Amino acid sequence: MKNNLWMFSVLIKHFPMYVIGFMFNKILMALPAYISNVLFLNVVINHLISHKPVYILLIYLVGLLAFLILVDIYNGCFVHIWQPRANEKIKKMFYNNFKNAVSRFEISVYDDPDYYDNITYISQNIFNDSIAALSYICDIIAGIINIILILNLFATIGIGLLLISSGSVIFSLLLNIPIAKLKNSHRFKTNQINRKKQYFFNTFFDRNTFKERKMTPVSLLLGKYYDESNLELQNCYKKYGRKLFLLNFASEAFSSSFLMNFGLIAFLLYGVFISNTIEGGDFIAAYNGTNVITSTVMQIIGVFALMKNNAFTIEKYRKLVAFTQLAISSCENSDFEVNKIELRNVSFKYPGTNRMVLRNINLTLQKGDKVAIVGKNGSGKSTLINLLMGFYWPTDGEIFVNEQLLKKTDCETYRRQFAAFFQEMKPFEATAAENVALDTSIDTDKLTQVLQQTCCSSLMNDPENVWIGKNLNTQGLILSGGEYQKLMLAYCLYSKQAIVVMDEPSSALDPISERNFYDQVSKFLDGKMIIFVTHRLSTVHMAKYIFVLEDGKLIEEGTHSQLIKQDGLYKRMWDIQYKKYGKENG
């Protein structure tokens, strides 16, 4: 209940008029059950029995019709005009909260499948569950108003109505709570399976897998896993469906049909024919009123049970958006500048694993340095970069920035000092200008300059209107790997960050283009701290200092000329690649 009340308070804080209109609509929609089925029928029958003038009945009828028409008009305006617009505003609020919360997460959460289960579950359910929480609370308020209006029936007709209603309520309470728990478990389990099923479905239609699907039988593999997920989902529905059927059948049969229909009719007939305590319009008023009040109470109890489903989602959402409340002074500290980064005895292992990916790393980087981190695949290069950029936190050891210990609370400021692009990065579905600026505000003069410097001639005519990608625009451009790397180099030139990280930046380039690329980097990024990560050494000797990794250890460091004189890993890698690329690139 507290989570639903929390969500109710959030909605009324941000959308007070919508909540008031929603509640008013619920109350209006609940009143006709009492006015039409209880009050109006009681008045009509009593008037007919007492032979009062017909025009009085017509006045009541006209008043009832006018009320029902007004209720219908208000409900129509609310549902079709006001509510859709308000819902989009609420979705926008959730989107912004999601965006702010996820931006606070460390990269380690993306290594945990539970993160994807939770984020998928919350994103798919939070809007509907938040509106449901609002609806349930309004249902309770409207139901209480209805109950108060009908309570006088218990006083005039007898305690028997209370006992019958109480019996139905007790049965409903006993059965609806386990039903709600079962539905909650069922929904979360099917969400997990659906995420896996959707992954294999989307992968089959993903443009990035087109070549593999055409060249290999991978479609059979994807189909196999999709079918297995589908079967798992069917078994899940079968397992939970039987239990839900039995519990719902028991709830309907014993709480509603048996106690209400048979017990109530028997009690009222006894009052009419034997005890003579009920007569005239009271019979119908009592029957309808008891049905209304009992169904209302059971609805309220059902609402409390359903709130457990909402509470599950809202609790997860509350934990997620708690990240938005973290103070991030970094964004306001525009004067912060990194002059020195030092790793002292840093070791690291990924969460949930025991193997140390990096072991006792000690290195120092200064402002203006051009350094390279090299090593064979799997040596820990990318992990080291993630630590340098503050995406992971050392398992052991410490990171110092400007001679001060880097704390987790400072990471947001620290990360904003980096401009980077990685080999796995893909262009955004946006304009060429937006892909360079990666911002909503664009300096057009600077944009033109960096595009000219990086030779992005195909985008020069109108970069602010040239669309990248075809998912959203059939006229969009599909960039080659080399073209995109030039575009990302333009981003590095455009950005104001003092540190540039390039992880395998020339992997899609031929040797000549690779040399030109590094010449541009050296020329246009002079004065910035530049960190290259690569296992290709054809141009890495341009770096002033080189760190060599092997099996997570820093085994060599020095300039190109120093390392080439040593009989170590760097020398062996250089000799192999020198033969491949030739003296021209040596």
Image (cartoon, rainbow, N blue to C red):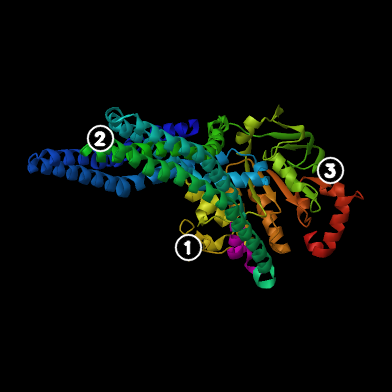
Q: Is residue 248 above or below residue 216?
A: above
Residue under label 2:
278
Closer to us: 309 or 368: 309
CB-based contact (under 8 Å), mark 1 and mark 3 = no
Question: What is the C-alpha distance between the residues marked 1 and 2?
Answer: 73 Å
CB-based contact (under 8 Å), mark 1 and mark 2 = no
Residue under label 3:
553
Kindly identify the residue that appears in the image at 22 percent across and 36 percent down.
279
Q: Secondary structure at mark 3?
A: strand
Question: What is the C-alpha distance between the residues marked 1 and 3?
Answer: 47 Å
Closer to us: 554 or 570: 554
**Label 2 CA crowd tier, 10 Å (few <14, some 14–19, many 20+):** many
Residue stretch rendered in magenta on the structure: 198-211
Residue at the extreme right: 567
Residue 404: horizontal and vertical position, in percent? 70, 27
Residue under label 1:
473
Q: Is residue 71 visible?
A: yes
Between marks 2 and 3 in the image, the one whose residue lies nearer the viewer: 2
Task: Identify the image quadrant of the C terminus.
Answer: bottom right
Who comes first in sequence, dot 1 or dot 3?
Answer: 1
Q: Is residue 399 magenta?
A: no
Q: Which mark is residue 450?
A: none
Q: Is residue 486 visible?
A: no
Residue 49: horizontal and vertical position, in percent? 14, 40
